[in-house]
């Protein structure tokens, strides 16, 4: 029986992770650990309103909340996922019903929702986002903006199936 040996240099330089199956001489793909799910952030669920409507825009707009939604493990983009967004803005407080809205991800797992400019609440300009449907575990995010003058805020979800 002839064994095909693979040197460390060959493994590193090929750019693809491979393993030599013990004693078989066969090359098999290495298994990636996988992409870990996003954990809810402290304060993310503050002023959450279950069932916020899907909207084209919250208020007068001028600020963009954007991000992606992918599946834990393989990182596949998730289309048609509902993301709720709310914040303290120039047009209302984060507890006001008119400051809440939801949007759906596109075929690439991307979401975008225009809303009024986010302003500081409790000293920090921040937004709130939630994935709250039945297919995956609920996740609440509370990303903080670098500056109150920023015109966009980005957040990314990695969802764990229920």
Image: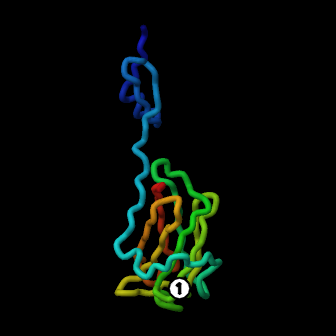
In the image, residue 3 above or below residue 17: above
- 16 vs 52, left or right, is left
Q: Position of residue 158 (x, y in %)?
A: 46, 58
The image's colouring method is: rainbow
Q: Quadrant of residue 115?
A: bottom right
Q: Residue at 41% of width from left, 29% of height from top?
A: 19
Of 102 and 62, nearer the camera is: 102
Figure check: 44 above or below 90: above
Kindly state the secondary structure of the residue where label 1 is placed. helix
- Which residue is denoted by mark 1 in the rendering? 99
The N terminus lies in quadrant:
top left
Residue at the far bottom: name it: 91
Q: Residue at x 45, y 61 (%)?
A: 137
**Residue 128 found in image quarter:** bottom left
* Residue 14 vs residue 69, the one in the foreground: 69
Judge the density around disc 1: few (<14), some (14-19), many (≥20) Cα neighbours within 10 Å. Answer: many
**Of residues 155 and 12, which is closer to you in this image?**
155
The number of numbered discs placed on residues in the rendered structure image is 1
**Residue at 53% across / 91% down in the picture?**
91
Q: Residue 3: image x %, image y %?
A: 41, 14
Residue placed at 50% from the left, 67% from the top? Answer: 131
Q: Position of residue 23 (x, y in %)?
A: 37, 18
């Amino acid at each position: 029986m002839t064994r095909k040996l693979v040197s460390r240099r060959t493994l590193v330089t090929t750019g693809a992770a491979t393993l030599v199956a013990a004693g078989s001489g066969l090359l098999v793909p290495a298994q990636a650990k996988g992409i870990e799910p996003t954990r809810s952030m402290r304060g993310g669920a503050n002023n959450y309103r279950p069932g916020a409507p899907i909207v084209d825009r919250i208020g007068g707009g001028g600020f963009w909340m954007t991000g992606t939604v992918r599946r834990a493990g393989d990182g596949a983009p998730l289309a048609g996922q509902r993301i709720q967004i709310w914040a303290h803005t120039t047009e209302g407080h984060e507890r006001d019903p008119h400051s809440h809205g939801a949007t759906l991800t596109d075929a690439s797992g991307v979401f975008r929702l225009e809303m009024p400019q986010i302003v500081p609440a409790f000293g920090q300009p921040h937004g709130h986002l939630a994935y709250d449907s039945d297919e995956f575990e609920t996740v609440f995010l509370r990303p903080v903006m670098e500056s109150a003058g920023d015109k966009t805020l980005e957040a990314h979800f990695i969802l764990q199936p229920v």
